[in-house]
Structures are given as C-alpha cells and as structure tokens.
Image (cartoon, rainbow, N blue to C red):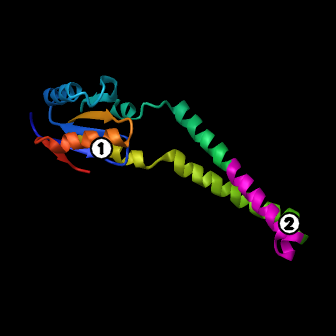
Amino acid sequence: MDTFEILSYADHRVGAVLTGKAAAEELQNELLNSHLVQHEHLQLVNPYDKDADKRLEPKSESRLARNMLNWHLYLGSMGVILGFLIAGLLVSYGPAFTQANPYLTFIALLSPGLFLGLFASGLISLRPDKDAFNQAVMNKIAEGKWLLIIKTNNEAHRSKLMSFFKNSTNADVLN
C-alpha cells in the first residue's frame, strides 16, 4: 500500500488521504478486518464527487436551523433568568440607587443577560472546530486525492484509531 496522510483535528472524525481508489479500498478493508470501526462509520469520498461538501455535513439545513434555534432559545432564556436573579439581588440588597429604581435595574440587567446568552449560543451552535477538518478535506479533494473519513464514537475510540495509524508504517499523521 502507498503511504497516506492522516487528518485529525479536534473533531470526532479522522480522515485518511490516499492517492487512488484501490489504496482507499485497501485501507478500508484493513480497518474493517482489524475490527476498529464498523462499516457505517466509514465514508469514502472521491475527488470527482461534485457533492463532497454536502457529504461532509450530512445534517440537513432544517436540522441545523432547529439546532441553532434550540441553543438560542435555551441560552437566551438562561441569560434572561440570570439577569433577573442578579437584578433581584441588587434591588433587595444592593446599593441605594438600585433599590430606589427597581425597574431601571431590571431593564439594565435583563438586556445584557439576553445578549450574552444569545452570543454564547451563537458560539456553541456554529462550532468552528468542524470547519478546520472540512477545509482540509476540501483542499485534498481539490488536489485530486481520495479520502476515507472515519467517524469515531468518542475520544477513546479516536485515540485507539490514531495509535493504529501511528503504528502503521505507511501513515503520515499531519495533525
């Protein structure tokens, strides 16, 4: 088998970059025979696939939008509740200004609570850690390389897979 590169980022996926279809299928069979992964966790992406970017992110847009909406509703409401609790404490036990103007105190703390909750939900739902792997895969596809993408279950499974590749004489681990 030819040498191949391994792409591994902070993602739950590991990618093996190979020069041809035969090498990709050989590695796929080797992984299946070693019982490290199941067939449904393997995805072979060829460089001629026009929908490779959609295959990397199989979530439909409606599921992605629903996930983002759920995070925004949850963390936005948590921010409002936190702002409400802090304002209540300030009105009850805080400085004289906050005790004399409870409405202004609640307005002043509910708004930043909502903003910070929505900001945090945007950071969580957009997940920039997935983009690095996808960009690396798309760059390799543009170079005409075949990719075998392995979806791991957890960090222990990913570590076992990475040690398998590091012990292989043909693998060149990039990240």
Residue 93 belongs to magenta span: yes
Q: Nearer the viewer, residue 38 or 52?
A: 38
* 142 lies left or right of 87: left
* 171 lies left or right of 74: left
Q: Residues within 10 Å of mark 1 (few under 14, many from 20)?
A: few
Q: Nearer the viewer, residue 149 or 47?
A: 149
Where does label 2 land, which residue? Answer: 92
> In x, y percent, where is residue 21?
17, 27
Q: Residues within 10 Å of mark 2 (few under 14, many from 20)?
A: few
* 89 lies left or right of 123: right
Q: Earlier in the sequence, mark 1 or mark 2?
A: 2
Q: Residue at x 53, y 52 (%)?
A: 123
Question: Could you say which quadrant of the image residue 68 lies in?
Answer: top right
> In x, y percent, where is residue 135?
33, 45
Question: Could you say which quadrant of the image residue 111 lies in?
Answer: bottom right
Q: Residue at x 67, y 49 (%)?
A: 76
**Quarter placement of the N terminus:** top left
Distance in Å between CA atoms under marks 1 and 2: 52 Å
131 to 49, vertically: above or below = below
Residue type at mark 1? Ser
Q: Which mark is residue 159?
A: 1
Q: Main secondary structure of the magenta part?
A: helix
- The span picked out in magenta is 77-99
Secondary structure under the numbered disc 2 in the rendered image: helix
